[in-house]
Amino acid sequence: MAFSQDILCIGAGYVGGPTMAVIADKCPDLKVTVVDINPARIAAWNSDDLPIYEPGLLDVVRRARGRNLFFTTDVPTGIRAADVIFVSVNTPTKTFGEGAGRAADLQYWEKTAREILANSDRPKIVVEKSTLPVRTAEAMRRILNSNDRGLRFDVVSNPEFLAEGTAIADLESPDRVLIGGEETADGRRARRVIADIYATWVSRDRIIESNLWSAELSKLTANAFLAQRISSINSISALCEKTEADIDEVAYAIGTDSRIGPRFLKASVGFGGSCFKKDILNLVYICEHYGLHEVARYWEAVVKMNEWQQTRFVRTMVSAMFNTVAGKRIALFGFAFKADTGDTRESAAIQVTRQLLEEHASVVITDPKALDNARRDLEHVTGDVSFEADPYVAAAGAHAVAVLTEWREYRDLDFRRILDSMVKPAFLFDGRNILDHDALFEMGFNVFAIGKSPRLHF
Ligand code: UDX
Ligand code: ADP
């Protein structure tokens, strides 16, 4: 079959994989190829055991794979054939040199730009899909158009707003699609090509076009605002624990104000994920670069509050358990940074585990989807840590259970059976406020939840 356009995506990760699967599913006339330098990842995308867990993803992949969706490690051939190239390689926070711990590490991006240049023999549209500091598209455009072969590249920014765990729904019915490009005739034409792809299934009034800077900065700003809501409600949760206020009641009451709205007000052990911290630190770095130190400090506080919330959770555990957890078995329910994903990047569970191990606790981790990632995250950590798929086995003989991920199945566990198998007094720390605290207290647990007064039997 002849396809109308050849689309390539470089980087088969959490963003590139699901996004391209949905584009291929919705647009059967496009040939969509996803390339990655990691052969194991590509092999997994070509199997029914996909490299990432995302509800609904396998169905979408199965419908399109082999028809108009292809996964391969052959980057040069993919580049040569493509009309449009989406770039969604990783942009982690720099760990070295200037801007270490804040700025984005752009080595993968720059390498990709040079690969595109080396393997192209005709003009192409290059779409920035990863989150990057503002002005990266501009740097990309300079590298690509610095060739002496007369080749022209249009660079478009199309930031991704999907959230893990709901990626397919977010891609299929997005609040908006944002497409940034240069304010020139060529730039507008390139924007239009990308808008037309999305318009196959997204209504035009949800497709927003802007200049490159606005598109890139909007992505960082959206994530900074979302994370700020969580840090704000978490800061108030600490005050609730000191008073008789209840954080869920406060969140409900303020969320009914239509100017505030009810979403993203769930107090927790702290936000995680690959975006929030990284994007805010990027924003902070950019502000500092422009001498806007007050703005930098303002946003940095969102990250600091999050780190404090994680530490505070462990401090509460230690002080509740008579100021020592040394040698005590503690079962952590959930390691993923949120439910419905196996992703553990920046998960609060990582900090909680490390700090409990520093206190010499014996930590047992359970999670329905994230145990492999948890093992990798804790590979170099010293201390008594083990992994157990069955939450009942994890809790047996434990002094405490701490819920760190809001997996649905944890609400439906037989807590009577768990309590009977634990050392007494038994402690339950609900870092996600998903359990029925009154019922658990009645049963015999000493219950600590975020932003609520402790329920104690002694
Ligand atoms: C986020 C943005 O939502 C998405 O638009 C962007 O493209 C990428 O970053 P993601 O990190 O996948 O998505 O998940 P999200 O649902 O935003 O949750 C982030 C973290 O905040 C999780 O650890 C979650 O548990 C936590 N969270 C979220 C809360 O603690 N309370 C809330 O009310 C909401
Ligand atoms: P994200 O969450 O942004 O999607 P991931 O780390 O999940 O990030 O995915 C990024 C992917 O990009 C990885 O699978 C990595 O192997 C791939 N990648 C990085 N650099 C290149 C490159 N130069 N060519 C092809 N793939 C690359």
Image: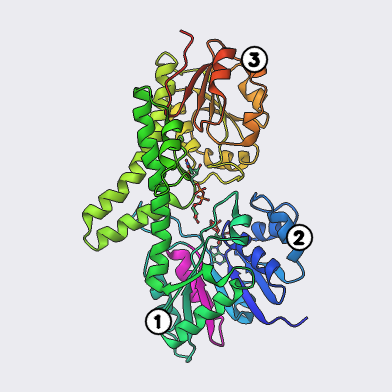
Q: Earlier in the sequence, mark 3 or mark 1?
A: 1
The label shown at residue 62 is 2
Q: Earlier in the sequence, mark 3 or mark 2?
A: 2
Regarding residue 105, the answer to whether it shows in the image is no
The label shown at residue 183 is 1
Quadrant of the rendered structure where residue 21 is? bottom right
Q: Residue at x 39, y 18 (%)?
A: 319
Kindly indicate whether the residue at mark 2 contacts the one at mark 3 (C-beta within 8 angstroms): no
Could you tell me residue 340's position as x and y percent? 62, 44
Q: How is colour applied across the structure in the image?
A: rainbow
Left or right of 409 on screen, residue 107:
left
Left or right of 314 on screen, residue 198:
right
Kindly indicate whether the residue at mark 1 contacts the one at mark 2 (C-beta within 8 angstroms): no
Of residues 57 and 252, the one nearer the viewer is: 252
Residue tagged 3 = 421
Q: Which residues are magenta?
A: 105-130
